[in-house]
Amino acid sequence: MAEKTYLQAISDGLRQEMRLDQRVFVLGEDVGVYGGAFKVTDGFQAEFGPWRVLDMPLSETAIVAGATGAALMGMRPVAEMQFADFVSCAWDHLVTVAAKQHYRAGTPIPIVLRLPSGGGFSGGPFHSQNPESLFAHIPGLKVVCPATPEDAKGLLVTAIEDANPVLFFEHKHLYRRIKGEVPDERYSTPFGKARIHREGGDIVVVTWGAMVYTAAEAAGIVAQDGISVEVMDLRTLIPWDREAVLESARRTSKVLVLHEDTRTGGFGAEIAATIAEEAFEYLDGPVKRIAAPDTPVPFSPPLEQAYLPQIDDVVAGLRELAAY
């Protein structure tokens, strides 16, 4: 298998689906002539034409509304928000119309919103958020957060095939930094199935997206202390793999939930509550959460570093749990 970056894997998966299914098309700001803000759709307009790779006005509302209308007419649009933060502009169309249409009228809404998310580049409060928990609360939406190139391609294929609106969060810090073997052929990765990134027996870290790698590095450090840490990559938040999380919680008896989103109301709280309700008697310590503080993402590089969960934060949390 060829080694590809996270970005290349997403681009390849999208291109293959467009070649396979004429109903699949791309729309967004600068996705055509320019090839996308991060060059995921570079060369797409030359191959598929301007009617299947649409450069849209600077209006996320128009993009999501247009995608919803196209889906109602039988198309399978893939819309890029350029930055995940700006999807809030289209909140009403997404959560009031697209998310509820299937329930209300039985009409499938097969749209995918590609959402470049995450911090680490001093982008500040308008270009660095991880708002996945906001949408995990909305019935009718599916939320996907791939961490590896292989999963990024496979989960995107599944998202495009799905009859429901799918929010596909692509962490910007992974685009060109993470590489891995990715099959050239078409394949799909199922929603709701967690992946064990690193095996361990003393503590399980439940996480997703870029934090998978932060957790893995921290696990390697505490392994020198004799602490065996399992790192579980959820891959999708809606649906999420409750049984895999509960099985690991019961087996290890100690759980740390790690995410880059803010702490209060973050999806980690749902995971912690589920473990407390359904695996409490198996626990040898409290379910610990490490997340960003409840503030906007800072512009300043040192402040942003203090804001984002770091390897040292996870190491300290793991040692604290191990000693409990």
Image (cartoon, rainbow, N blue to C red):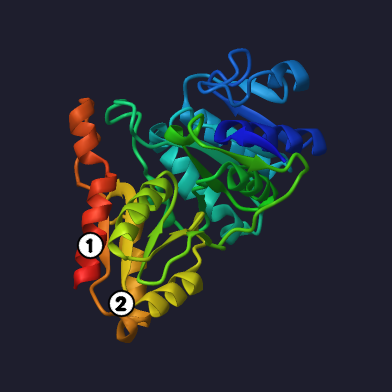
Distance between the alpha carbons at the discs numbered 1 and 2: 21 Å
Residue drawn at x 81%, y 38% is 20
Is label 1 in a helix, a strand or a loop?
helix
Q: Position of residue 169 (x, y in %)?
A: 48, 42
Q: Quadrant of residue 92?
A: top left
Front one among 175 and 239? 175
Badge 2 crowding class, 10 Å Cα cut-off, few under 14, some 14 to 19, many 20 or more, is: some
Mark positioned earlier in the residue sequence (1 or 2):
2
Is label 2 in a helix, a strand or a loop?
helix
Mark 1: amino acid: Arg
- Number of numbered tags placed on the structure image: 2
Q: Quadrant of the C terminus?
A: bottom left
Looking at this view, name the residue that lies furthest to the bottom: 281
Q: Is residue 159 left or right of residue 177?
A: right
Front one among 142 and 275? 275
- Asked whether residue 87 is in view, the answer is yes
Badge 1 crowding class, 10 Å Cα cut-off, few under 14, some 14 to 19, many 20 or more, is: some
Q: Quadrant of the N terminus?
A: top right
Q: Residue beneath label 2, please? A: 276
Q: Is residue 23 left or right of residue 70?
A: right
Residue drawn at x 40%, y 32% is 86
Q: Which mark is residue 107?
A: none
Front one among 245 and 2? 2
Of the two numbered discs 1 and 2 in the rendering, the one whose residue sits closer to the viewer: 1
Please determine whether, in this image, residue 4 is positioned above or below residue 140: above
Q: Quadrant of residue 16?
A: top right
Please determine whether, in this image, residue 94 is positioned above or below residue 318: above
Q: Position of residue 271 (x, y in %)?
A: 36, 66
Mark 2: amino acid: Ala
Q: Which mark is residue 319?
A: 1
- Asked whether residue 296 is in view, the answer is no
